[in-house]
Amino acid sequence: MKPAEFFNLIHIDEYSATPKYLQLSDSIIEAIEDGKLKKDDILPSINELSYVLEVSRDTAEKGYKYLKNKGVILSVPGKGYYIDNTEFKKKIKIFLLFNKLSIHKKLIFDSFADALGEDAVIDFYIYNNDFKIFKKLIQNKRTDYSHYVIIPHFVEGGENAAQIINTLPKEKLILLDKKVPGVDGQYSAIYENFDKDIYSALTEAKEALMKYQTLKLIFPKRGYFPQEIVNGFKRFCQQYAFNHHIVSDVRNEPIMAGEVFINLMEDDLVILIERVISLNLKVGSDVGIISYNETPLKKFLLNGITTISTDFQMMGTLAAEIIKNQRRQDQEAPFYLTLRPSL
């Protein structure tokens, strides 16, 4: 194969969160599966890969090493690298699109990838809650995928998300964490029921909450969090006669004994704890704290922060099972209250 023909088969996407060495090795495997690379075909040298693809020499070498460990290619002194094995099971190819990176998003990714195992190639993208990037990534996807797995959260422009998502084949679509109004057809979803989840969790914590007079939900004005969280919070407070308040900026909010704060963002949790300590108030007796999304650190912070959280690991595992079992599924993700001394 001529070098120019080979490099036409290789796709390195600067926007992808998938490491470049995996993009390189996945492109070679895909070319073998499509019959465009054959047994004993000579591959470019590491220096050629690095120069033409504009990647580091380490990236090129790591991609070839990955393929050697898989038994796909071999190298011989004086001959270079060549295709050794073309007889392997064709992998499913998945377009994975997350709104951002975070500890709990990593839980989803890790459980998803682990459950799929070696049978899948994942093209992983992040759009940072930006609808314009989200739209561009979907419209510019370079290949046909077996499944499109998407977490749809936006700071602005989300009202147009359904129009873009509806361009994808529904039998291949899996929405995670949130459903999008206006997405039609028969697709799969593993999602949070934001209104019901916070209402049920606070109801379960009602006995611990009774020693406080006021509940405050920290809900940033410029954020991607669904309004349904506010609806469920207000419904609980009204039913059980709690004073309640929606806080847009915890940095300027008065903090008094007898209040419980519910935070959604990790940055707000840090600011809240700093301010409570600076006021010589005691967390768990003077001021209560409930934090969204379980993370390992919250088990130990201030002897334990009470959390309300989706089971993110299960969300990733369920999405993988939909793909492996080739079935459609529509399911609310489990949501848990974990009571700790902060309340």
Image (tube, rainbow, N blue to C red):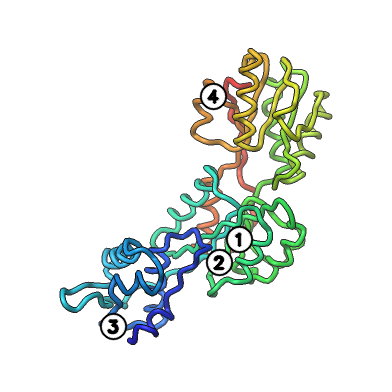
**Which amino acid, by three-letter code, is at mark 4?**
Gly
> Which tag is nearer the camera, tag 1 or tag 4?
4
Query: Does residue 304 sit above or below 265 in this rendering?
Result: above
Label 1 and label 4: CA atoms lie apart by 34 Å
Mark found first going from the N terminus, 2 or 1: 2
Label 4 and label 3: CA atoms lie apart by 59 Å
Q: Which residue is mark 3?
A: 41
> Disc 4 vs disc 3: Cβ atoms closer than 8 Å?
no
Q: Which residue is mark 1?
A: 174
Q: Is residue 157 left or right of residue 295?
A: right
Mark found first going from the N terminus, 2 or 4: 2
Q: Which residue is mark 4?
A: 304
Q: Nearer the viewer, residue 172 or 7?
A: 7
Label 1 and label 3: CA atoms lie apart by 38 Å
**x and y, in percent, of residue 102 in the image:** 54, 45
Q: Is residue 286 left or right of residue 243?
A: left
Q: Residue at x 73, y 17 (%)?
A: 256
> Disc 2 vs disc 1: Cβ atoms closer than 8 Å?
yes
Q: Which mark is residue 226?
A: none
Query: Does residue 211 sit above or below 96 in this rendering?
Result: above
**x and y, in percent, of residue 4 in the image:** 39, 84
**x and y, in percent, of residue 272 in the image:** 65, 26
Q: Secondary structure at mark 2?
A: strand
Q: Secondary structure at mark 4?
A: loop
Q: Residue at x 53, y 63 (%)?
A: 15
Label 2 and label 3: CA atoms lie apart by 31 Å
**Which amino acid, by three-letter code, is at mark 3?**
Asp
**Which amino acid, by three-letter code, is at mark 1?**
Ile
Q: Secondary structure at mark 3?
A: loop
Mark found first going from the N terminus, 1 or 3: 3
Q: Which mark is residue 147?
A: 2
